Amino acid sequence: MKVRFKKIELLVHHRDKSTIATMLQDLGVIHLELNRDFRSQPVEDLELRKTRLSKAIELIEEHVDKKQEYLKVTASESGAIDLVIDETLALKRQLELNHKQQGALSKDKQKRSPWGDFDQNTLERLTESGVSIDFYIGEKRDFKKYDFGSLVHQVIHEGAGRIYFVLISKGGDVSLPFESVHLPPMRISDIQSEEAKLEGEKNELIKDICSYIPYLPLLREEALHLENQLQLQLANGSYKTYGKTSILHLEGWYPANMEDRLLHFLQKEELSYGVSEPSAEDVIPVLLNNPKYPKLFEPITRIFQLPDYYEMDLTPFIAVFYPILFAYCLGDAGYGLILFTIALIGGFTFLSKSRNLAFLGMILGAFTTVMGVVKSGSLFGIPIIADQAHPIFEFLAQYVMIPEDREVFFNAFNVALLIGVVQILVGIMVSIINKIVYQSILVSLSQIGKLLMVVSLIWIFLADMQDVDLFLPYDRARKLMLAMGVLMVLLFHDLKKPVLTRAASAILPLFFIITGILGDILSYVRLFALGVASSVLGLVVNQIGMQIMGDQWWSVLIGVIFLLLGHSLNFALAALGAFVHPLRLTFVEFYNNAQFGGGGMPYKPFRKIDVSHSK
């Protein structure tokens, strides 16, 4: 569900624009159409200061121990902020230079290492006396094949199939078909000494950076102040001239449910304004407002895109289908219990600040636990139906409704396809409702035709390919439905074209509908495949683990460790697949059939950030 928005236009005298902008920022309701391209000296100064401050904060935060307790500077010391920024950025530059120097030394040491620790001055003295020492690297096989003749050479090092050698000659006019090497001037021992020196300097720099950790809360607070000031300056630059007068014009959007509060404020301040309903040409912000259960799935909606203002929010449908798809993929009741338990514990510990995420994990875990029993029946890789010796398995076996038996129509494979059929049909119906609500019934006729085609094609497939005799007496009805669907797509698929041109150009839409529905439905086979893979891997882990266990205590211990590690890895792999593949089915198959446009602009009211959140 989406919140309804209204458009508001303000008329302001140019002398009052800053005052009005500040008042609107304090109110924090209107989504202003800010001019992000507005440039002025205050804006550039604020952006520069914000950038410098962000770099300083980022550098200090890199060296904060999350468990570290540190003193905080008092507000009276806030005048030191500029000094902290300058000194922190200076330290950052020195640290970057230190890192660059260490990197260069590391490369020099790597080049020098195969040749040993010798003094370059010795080579220079030999060169002055007419003796040339040249360094070469060659492939081992090429080195052995080459005939050096009377040339004096000495192998220094061998490694990784390569030969490191020197050629000793007089005059230095000899050329060999090998890679010539020019060594860095510093010897290895000198490089190591310089590295140690730089490492010490680096540690001192880090100590100096850590000395500014107590200023972090103050710096974060200053960053929020800067953001508030920058947004205010951009708002001042977003006014438009109203004709040739000194009156300025400002546009924005507000949620209709906040109208009373907004209008009361405007009337109290005696501002001139106009309120209107949005038009189809307007770019309108989007604010989702779903009930508690669908709201848990809004993060999944935002992974892709927010809906456009003029289309339905599909979050409620995701809230229905995604847990089913997830549970079908994960497919093991034991793994569902683990996920539920982790989410439950996380809600009170590491997810205490993200309770909605914890609740979402609990829902997915609960669905998986139920689906793991209902579909095929698997508990930590143990087939429930095949092993009913234990009372728990005997009890759970009566709830297995979707077996993997090919002789049963509603087996695990077919049910995966049927889930896809239902979701695709719902998507097409959503697209029809979208067009009726936001456009017209006439525009929706093509999608209605697609729905008739898809239903009739599925009907034909079920009756003829799966030998379901229930539908055979209605053979004429399904063919008539298919013909009507084709005709509606032919006549209404593109209302901007003339009728004859429209009908002639309908070959591609019909082709995409017929081939697309087959590909979309078959995509849901991945639900069955991933569920089977998870169960089979769990079963294999159990079999190997039981074989490892013997009569000795250490073999039992090893077997238990193997079972824990094996099921942990299988659970992690299965959970990843169960998260990703339902997203793919949702964002590709479901969204495509629902003709989801997306691209909605999130509602961001022009408001002052509460600096207390930084403390």
Image: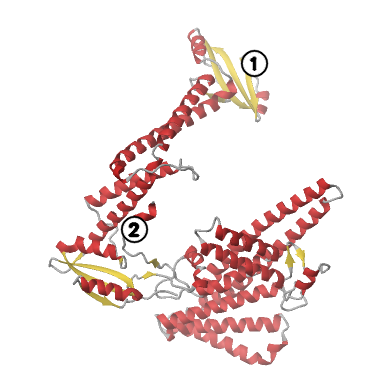
Q: Give the residue at mark 2.
A: 609
Q: Marks 1 and 2: in contact by CB < 8 Å?
A: no
Q: Position of residue 422 (x, y in %)?
A: 60, 78
Quarter of the rendering occupied by the N terminus: bottom left
Q: Give the quarter of the image for residue 524.
A: bottom right
Q: Residue furthest right?
A: 551
Q: Residues within 10 Å of mark 2 (few under 14, many from 20)?
A: some
- Type of amino acid at the residue the image marks with label 2: Ile
Q: Which mark is residue 149?
A: 1
Foreground of the two, 55 or 584:
55
Q: Position of residue 229 (x, y in %)?
A: 27, 54
Q: Give the quarter of the image for residue 419.
A: bottom right
Foreground of the two, 393 or 568:
393
Q: Position of residue 188 (x, y in %)?
A: 54, 21
- Type of amino acid at the residue the image marks with label 1: Gly
Whichever of labels 2 and 1 marks the residue nearer the N terminus, that label is 1
Foreground of the two, 86 or 556:
556
Q: Residue at x 52, y 72 (%)?
A: 293
